[in-house]
Image (spheres, helix red, strand yellow):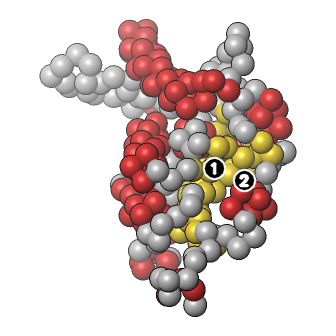
């Protein structure tokens, strides 16, 4: 009742935004996290009802560097514009792009068994040129522009293509490191390279400055904002056709890709 009577003191409000799943561009069927889908959710979290803070509940093995950067930048812009602190709570994993999102928060809380880190960039593919050659299949490619057949999986790798890809990956890695250093720099230990792509369990991540402590959402928010704090869950609303099971094949492929990402961390 108090929330509808403006002259009565209101209980502290903390919206809880669930960031669960692989990070991928909006065109990917079944992808859980992307900037376009999260934009209205985050806008509502930071601007409705005068929140005391916003909590991010993260469980993500990563994915697209671009979408990770866009989502994190949106979180920081809204937090700074509205002067609202952000707390990230890591469930099973905040790795790679998932940690990029966590680092956008002012405080990162983990479980002892959470997987945290993997501050690196990866590109993976397959090569089929020997396979198709074995079966008498000839690959014919015609281009205008010498780089248009860059890393064609049906042709042998060219050293110059591999080197070009490594330069691009290094540029993405530099952006990732800059984001983490900007957000966590004063808390990171000197003389230790945490940007190798390695990952750690939650309690060790705290020791390394990648997280602020071991804590869970409800008790921590009550500790900071009082026992009467209102935790309001917010999340992406799936379109009706997805809720009814449409595009099952595409969703299954996206799920398989997400499982492959999680498998890197033993999950």
| Residue 10 coordinates in the image, percent (x, y) | 57, 76
Residue 124 vertical placement versus 220 (above, below) = above
Q: Residue at x 42, y 42 (%)?
A: 73
Marks 1 & 2, CB-CB < 8 Å contact: no
Disc sitting over residue 110 in the figure: none
Q: Please name the residue shown 55% across and 83% down the image.
A: 8
Residue 43 appears left or right of 10? left
* In this rendering, position of residue 41 left or right of residue 13: left
Label 1 or label 2, whichever lies nearer to me, is 1
- Up the image or down, 65 lies above or below 245; here it is above
Instruction: Examine the rendered structure and indicate whether residue 229 appears above or below residue 186.
Output: below
* Residue 6: x %, y % from top left: 47, 82
Between 247 and 16, the one lying in front of the other is 16
Q: Residue at coordinates 62% horizontally, 50% vertically from top-left? A: 87
Residue 129, image x and y in percent?
45, 25
Q: Residue furthest left?
A: 144
Quadrant of the drawing holding the N terminus: bottom right
User: Mark 2: few, some, or many residues within 10 Å (few <14, many ≥20)?
Assistant: many
Cα–Cα span, label 1 and label 2: 10 Å
Residue 151: tell me if it is visible. Answer: yes
Q: Where is residue 91 shown, x and y percent of the image?
A: 72, 53
Name the residue at the bottom extreme: 1
Camera-nearest residue between 200 and 144: 200
Q: Which residue is mark 1?
A: 88
User: Please, which residue is most extreme toward the front here?
Assistant: 7
Nearest the viewer among 265 and 138 is 265
The residue at which mark 2 appears reads as 91
Q: Is residue 259 left or right of residue 160?
A: right
Residue 260 seen in the current view = no
User: Which quadrant of the structure image shows residue 231?
Assistant: bottom right
Q: Label 1's element?
A: strand
């Amino acid at each position: 009742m108090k929330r509808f009577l403006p002259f009565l003191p209101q209980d502290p409000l903390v919206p809880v935004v669930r960031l669960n799943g692989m990070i991928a561009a909006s065109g990917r069927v079944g992808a859980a996290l992307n900037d376009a889908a999260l934009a209205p959710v985050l806008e509502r979290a930071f601007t409705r009802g005068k929140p005391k803070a916003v909590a991010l509940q993260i469980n993500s093995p990563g994915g697209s560097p671009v979408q990770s950067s866009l989502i994190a930048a949106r979180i920081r812009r809204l937090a700074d514009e509205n002067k609202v602190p952000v707390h990230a709570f890591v469930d099973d994993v905040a790795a790679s792009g998932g940690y990029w999102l966590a680092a956008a928060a002012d405080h990162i809380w983990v479980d002892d068994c959470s997987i945290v880190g993997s501050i690196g960039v990866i590109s993976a593919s397959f090569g089929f040129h020997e396979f198709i050659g074995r079966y008498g299949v000839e690959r014919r490619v015609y281009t205008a522009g010498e780089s248009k057949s860059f890393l064609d999986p049906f042709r042998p790798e060219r050293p110059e293509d591999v080197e070009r890809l490594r330069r691009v990956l290094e540029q993405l890695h530099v952006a990732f490191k800059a984001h983490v250093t900007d957000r966590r720099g004063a808390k990171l230990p000197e003389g230790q390279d945490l940007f190798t792509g390695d990952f750690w369990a939650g309690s060790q991540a705290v020791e390394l400055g990648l997280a602020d402590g071991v804590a869970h959402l409800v008790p921590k928010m009550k500790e900071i904002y009082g026992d009467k704090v209102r935790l309001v869950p917010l999340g992406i609303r799936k379109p009706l056709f997805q809720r009814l099971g449409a595009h099952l094949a595409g969703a299954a492929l996206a799920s398989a890709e997400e499982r492959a990402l999680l498998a890197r961390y033993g999950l």
